Amino acid sequence: MNVPQVSLESLAEEPSVSVLRLSGDIGIEHISGIVQRVDALPENKRAHLLIDLSAVGFLSSPVVGALMGCRERLSRKGCSISLLSPRPELAEKLELMGVNLVFRHYRTKEDFLKDFRWEAREESRKLQLQIPARAGYVPALRHLISGLLLCKGYSSREAFVLESIVDELSNNAIEHGHPPDKKFCITFSFDKRHARLAVTNSCPELSPEEQEKVRDKFRNPRVESDAFRGRGIALIKKLSDEMTFHVEARKIQVVVTKLREEL
């Protein structure tokens, strides 16, 4: 194992993130150097700390305790602290000590950056698909979108609402698309605050008068009491925070926005 070292540098991909690199066997004699560097972070305007453990062979309990103290102080100042790439043997020991319950930890720098940009930068995720216009594909599409939301902290209720919107818009595109054996397009984007779904399908050529009739259906959805279909637009309006539509001679697009209920 290399000679123990403690160094601090900014992360090239994210200047607001500092990387505390530790190597070798880190014991009690290194605590003062670690604490001094960490406590200086807010003064240096780098509010987030990533502790790189990839080259650490041993991390003493007092050092772990000191890092927990650093985390508490940084948290009070709106800063974050995470662990990167502990070796399997060290990761196992840290887990036994309950460190994984206190610190977020990441296997790679790329994993950290994805999560950091989602949390701190509120970066959105985007999915674009072309789906065969067949009803059998809709359940898998619903489950895909709800799974993405659940993985990013959306509640089961929020995921279910988006599933319902996906179901209605997809079946509407399949029913009214042309020709039926082709595809419809879906664009789904979401961040910490809202989700947006756009469904686009081709259609038989519509005259200006027919286009206006379609627009009127979106503006003022009417449901007959004995109708089996036709309830979708009214339901989507009720479930969403905003619904817009674009009707052209050969294309119809519906865009729905749903705000987060739980933040």
Image (cartoon, rainbow, N blue to C red):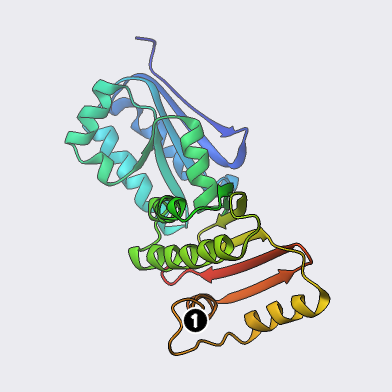
Asked if residue 205 shows in the view, the reply is yes
Residue at x 63% of width, y 67% of height: 255
Residue carrying label 1? 238
Residue 52 position, x and y percent, is 43, 29
Report which quarter residue 180 is drawn in: bottom right
Left or right for 234, reference 203: left
Report which quarter residue 201 is drawn in: bottom right
Q: Tell me the quarter of the image containing the C terminus.
A: bottom left
Q: How many numbered marks have been drawn onto this rendered protein structure?
A: 1
Residue 63 position, x and y percent, is 29, 33
Above or below residue 171? Residue 20 is above
Q: Tell me the quarter of the image containing the N terminus.
A: top left
Residue sticking out furthest to the left: 96
Residue at x 58% of width, y 62% of height: 173
Amino acid at pointer 1: Lys
Residue sticking out furthest to the top: 1
Q: SS class of the residue under badge 1?
A: helix
Q: Nearer the viewer, residue 176 or 189?
A: 176
Q: Nearer the viewer, residue 23 or 245?
A: 245
Residue 165 position, x and y percent, is 48, 67
Q: Nearer the viewer, residue 186 or 225?
A: 225
